[in-house]
Image (cartoon, rainbow, N blue to C red):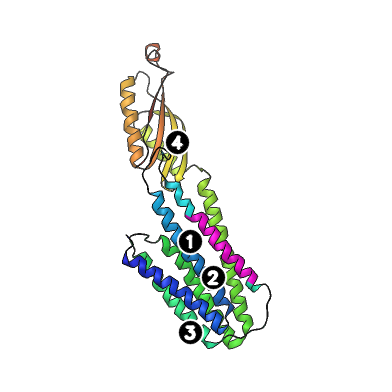
Amino acid sequence: MVDAAFKLGLFLSVAGAAVKIAGSLVYGSKALLVDGATCVAGIAAGLAALYWLRASQAPPDADHPFGHGRLAFGGVSFTLVAYGVAAGFGLAYLARPEPYSVGLGAVVLGLLGLILYSGAVAAFRRSPIVGGAMAAFTASEVFESIVSTLAAVGGFGFGYLVDYLGAWAIEAYLFYELVLHARSMVHQLSDMASAEAVGHVRRELEARGFRVASVRVRTLVPGRYHGDAIVLPPRGMDPLAADMLADEAVYALRRSGVDLTVHVDFSGQLAEDEERGPQTKWRAGPLN
């Protein structure tokens, strides 16, 4: 169920975007129109992020044994599309500079938009549904609101070129955000190993007397990992004891977000131990 803080934040965001666009269409500020377009993109991206965040919290099933965590990247993908459309609109709109005038009303509506977006950020941060997640989308709009308002002030007081340059500044910042989102998504989808997670796995295994031969851990989503390890038990350790210690390590790691398969290699033990099997495997179930 959507809480009151989220509804208030969404209402203030939409209202802020509307007054900026009105300030451009009625009073001539191009900076406000570019800013308004990015606001619309930010609202759409925030809603998409909320949808995919909820989808990513579904429990594991037959098709997703490691959980649905990576569905959260659907929100990042939509963000790239939404901001890409806004950036394309801005480029087309600013491509042919022509003299224009900026009215005082643009300054007033720019300030109103800034106030509304500041209120939206405060409301979203109080929402238990999204916390600071969606607030991050609107926080960038506060910065853009400051730029567009100052541009409108300059356009009204000193000429349209100040407003026009402000519009290009917002456009440049929009491309900067696009690059950041794209790099972040590629980084998180690259199955990059986490040195912190690998170190945590080694400590858990070594604390139980195992010698770690190899560890491979990949990031599923931030804070959740999957991988495997090969460990060597102390010479002469009973396989049943190794079984219990491996289970203990696996479930301890599972509680901290690491879904690990542990291979206990007995190849260095005595021949009578080898008769009981060269290798025993344990695997944690999917994270809850």
Q: Which mark is residue 123?
A: none
Could you say where residue 83 lies in the image, as x and y percent from the top left?
55, 63
214 lies above or below 104: above
Disc with the residue nearer the chain's start (2 vs 4): 2
What kind of residue is marked 1?
A: Ala
Q: CA distance from mark 2 to mark 3?
A: 18 Å
The structure residue drawn at horizontal position 36% and vertical position 70%, both measured from the top left corner, is 8
Residue carrying label 2: 37
Q: Nearer the viewer, residue 22 or 34?
A: 22
Could you tell me if the residues under marks 2 and 1 are in contact, i.e. CB atoms within 8 Å? no
The structure residue drawn at horizontal position 56% and vertical position 60%, both measured from the top left corner, is 178
What kind of residue is marked 3?
A: Val
Mark 1 burial class by Cα count in 10 Å: few <14, some 14-19, many 20+ = many
Q: Say if the magenta span includes residue 80.
A: yes
What kind of residue is marked 2?
A: Ala
Residue carrying label 4: 227
115 lies above or below 271: below
Q: Which mark is residue 108?
A: 3
Disc with the residue nearer the chain's start (3 vs 4): 3
Find the magenta span and give its range.
75-92
Q: CA distance from mark 3 to mark 4?
A: 56 Å
Could you say where residue 191 lies in the image, as x and y percent from the top left?
51, 42
